[in-house]
Image (cartoon, rainbow, N blue to C red):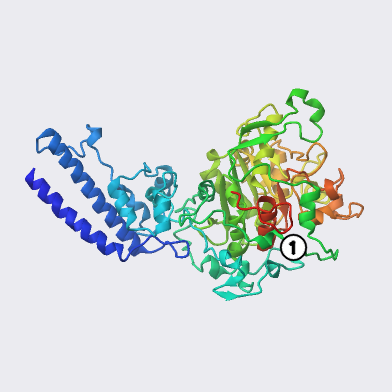
Amino acid sequence: RPAMQGVFGLLSMVWLCTTIYLFTSVSLPTSSREYDSKTNIDKIDNMIFLSDTIRTLQQQGSHHDNNGSGTDKSNDKSNPEMTTVSNHDHVNHLTDENGNPDPGYVHNATTLYDNPPSGNNHNEADASVLSMLTTPNQKQSLEDDDSPYTIDALRRNPYLGWQPPQQHLMQQLNFINGTATNFSWVDCLSSTAEYTGKAPDKDGSNQPLGCLERPSQLGNVSFSAEKFNETSWIPDITMLRTMLMHGRDRDGHPYPAQLPKELCRDFIISSDQNSTIDEDKRCFKEANIKPTGPLNASTVTISPWNHFGVSHNISDENKTSITVPAPKVLCLIYTVKNSHSTSIRAIRDTWGGGCDGFLAFSSSPDPRLPAIALQHEGPESYDNMWQKVRSIWKYVGAHYLDEFDWFFIGGDDMFVLPNNLRTYLASLAYKDGNADPRLKEYYVGRRFHSKEMEQKLKKKQKFPKNAKLYFNTGGSGYTLSHATLRKFLTVVDDVEHCSSNEKTSAEDVMMATCLHHLGIRVTDSRDRQGRERFHMFMPGRLYNWNIMEKNWYHRFNPWGLKNKADCCAPDTVSFHYAKQPAMVRHLHALLYHCSSSDSTYAGTAH
């Protein structure tokens, strides 16, 4: 026993000296510094190892005191009270093939995500280590009882809790880098970008600094395609949801980030109407478009009768609102690297955390967003979108299928109200006898009918002669139930019925023809009054749409179009052509932060 006490005392002195030294040289990275320092991680793990060693000796010493014998039972599996599990046992999850610490790289992705280190509570020794490794804000975040940013969680995903630098706090005072500016968010807008059909080909480098679109503001960091590829890395798709539910990032800043007051004011852009008012704001007000609940809601309040053509079949007692658990929805965004600092950052800063899971599929990986790059047949181009989408569904089916009830997919130029999506999907299933989306097939979105596409496919013998082609446009995003995705994956490589070898931009049409072969049809997603929930255009354009004009949009909607206050359902889910990040933030501010007054700010809503 005296010998053990001597060893314990010696190791305690070593630990104390080491921690004092490290206190002056190490800190967990903040949101403005990349979490990729091999040296820091190595020091962190060394300190944890020392902490674990001391804890083990303390337990052994305690056992000596209790037993009065020299027998070491600290790792005796038959004695669970004396078994110690060191956090250091899991350090290998942050190492590369040479054993060097490398945060974010998963050498064995299955081990990391399928068998995460157990336990989120740290004993006093761990708390002491953490207190010397963190800034004051990070310390508070890590020590909060409900904080998700535990050492185990950060080992599994070193980018959990990361946010770009909060430069907008300076912008609210019209200062950037301490210098007074005349910056206005309107400076970020183009008068034509909202209406163009092509994806932006620029990365935001030339935008005003205040727009938060420059790659340098996100962090000009290249992530190895070898380390962050589909075979060695499985992204943490719940990262944004975890941050939103906690309400703060790991530095203690609000998440989603607070938006400046100016975003509540009128944004006047119009390419063809010379309007003098904010048409998007007017649409929201006149059509009464609102979120059905906060982004962090765990329940949704549904109206099972609010579906087109079915209200008369629902008994009167069901014409009341019902609160049910919110279904779990995974949001999938296809994008390219140039959009990481622009569109994807804007989504991440606004509505992305409202989805239960979120993942971008890009031409380059970035675990901070998160975004992954998948291999697929053919080039990375708009004209080959079908092959990219096929690869997305395969990847999701392989890694995330069992975790979610619904799967929503679309491009990076969507604006989405996630809780409205979950509310509508829950209402749809309830209307159908409280159907289980894991068993019942649904294909939901903005329904179109194209005779032109229909005839082309029939000539190629890719579509039945006596059938009509209805499809959900990819522009506004569409949703597959769990059962539909599972069934689709059985025929995803079918050349004859699912055109698996086609190189085309019309991924939405290809999906519809494939699902039609499986007997799965589009769902009419309009509300009881025939107002659409998923939208091909931005709100202001829909509000002012000339419903008498005969064009492709008119042809694709043989059931008729609506405009003005009836253009959009109050529980609208999505809009297309939100190509400008400043407009995404503007729409989000109008719906979640701004009061009825045009220019007043109503605070932060999670």
Q: Nearer the viewer, residue 479 or 285?
A: 285
> Where on the picture, by quarter, is residue 519?
top right
Residue drawn at point x = 14 percent, y = 52 percent: 9
Q: Is residue 408 left or right of residue 266?
A: left
Q: Is residue 443 left or right of residue 85?
A: right
Image vertical order of residue 304 relative to residue 169, above or below: above
Number of numbered discs overlaid on the protein picture: 1
- Give the residue pinned by disc 1: 267
Q: Nearer the viewer, residue 392 or 437?
A: 437
Classify the position of the N terminus by image quarter: top left
Most extreme residue toward the left is: 2
Residue drawn at point x = 70 percent, y = 31 percent: 321
The amino acid marked with disc number 1 is: Phe
Question: Can residue 315 be seen from the camera position used here?
Answer: no
Secondary structure beneath disc 1? loop
Q: Residue 61 location in percent, x, y? A: 15, 42
Most extreme residue toward the right is: 548
Residue drawn at point x = 63 percent, y = 54 percent: 387
Q: Residues within 10 Å of mark 1 (few under 14, many from 20)?
A: many
Q: Residue 371 location in percent, x, y? A: 54, 56
Residue drawn at point x = 49 percent, y = 66 percent: 222
Q: Residue 577 location in percent, x, y? A: 73, 58
Image vertical order of residue 22 relative to residue 404, above or below: below
